[in-house]
Image (spheres, rainbow, N blue to C red):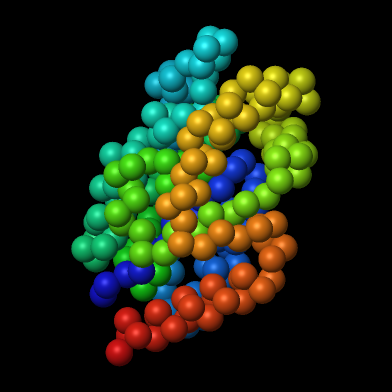
Amino acid sequence: MNPTIIGIAGGTASGKTTIAKRLYDEALKNGSVSLLKIDDYYYNKDKIPLSNNGKRNYDHPDSYDSSLILEHLQNLKKGIAINKPLYDFVTQSRKTTTEKIYPSNVIIVEGIMAFAIDKLLNLYDIKIFVDTPDDIRFIRRLIRDVKKRGRTIDSVIEQYTTTVKVMHNTFIEPSRKYADIIIPEGGHNQVAIDLLTTKISSIIQENML
């Protein structure tokens, strides 16, 4: 098996997860597919670096266990199953349980730092950057963090203005230069999704020959 690895990057709440899920579902119709969310590779809270305001900076490449991500992707390419960590955003730590991921025809890697972590770049066969306006991303993040991650409105706004936006401009936005494909408006861009799913189906069929 020679898997195709697809990297999906973009700003927070840009629609990366929606794109990844759509591509995952389509690839599943034609072959095997795995999905790795880089967020699951966050370090526990005590190892997250501090920002200038003294608070934990979850939007810096050093907040992720990039060596483990690299090891897991290399193992999957070799046909070796992995035990992927699972991250709890409420406790800001890894769960005690893991998820078994088996080798597959297509591996989708999704996360804001997918292209900002240098050691991962050479592993991607297709690099997709999801481009969504800042105001839309902020509103989506605000709703998500309050409803699903137990955050207060004030804490989300403070984190976004003091850390998230700065890190986006420092690491994520510059990483779009590595993209093979840029998708405006995330999961709402049906034309781009159709083109990508067709491409993925073609790749799977070629790998199965």
Q: Residue at x 46, y 62 (%)?
A: 180
Q: Position of residue 201 (x, y in %)?
A: 47, 81
| Residue sticking out furthest to the left | 78
Q: Residue at x 26, y 74 (%)?
A: 1
Can residue 128 be seen here? Answer: yes
| Residue sticking out furthest to the top | 54
Tell me the quarter of the image containing the C terminus. bottom left
Q: Residue at x 36, y 73 (%)?
A: 105
Q: Is residue 51 above or below residue 33?
A: above
Q: Position of residue 120 (x, y in %)?
A: 33, 48
Q: Is residue 181 left or right of residue 107?
A: right
The image quarter in which residue 149 lies: top right
Can residue 37 be seen here? Answer: no
Number of numbered discs on residues: 0
Q: Position of residue 46 (x, y in %)?
A: 43, 18
| Residue sticking out furthest to the bottom | 209
- Please name whichever residue, 104 or 122, is drawn nearer the observer in this view of the structure: 122
The image quarter in which residue 194 lies: bottom right
Q: Is residue 25 above or below residue 130?
A: below
Q: Position of residue 103 (x, y in %)?
A: 32, 66
The image quarter in which residue 47 lies: top left
Q: Is residue 124 left or right of residue 28?
A: left
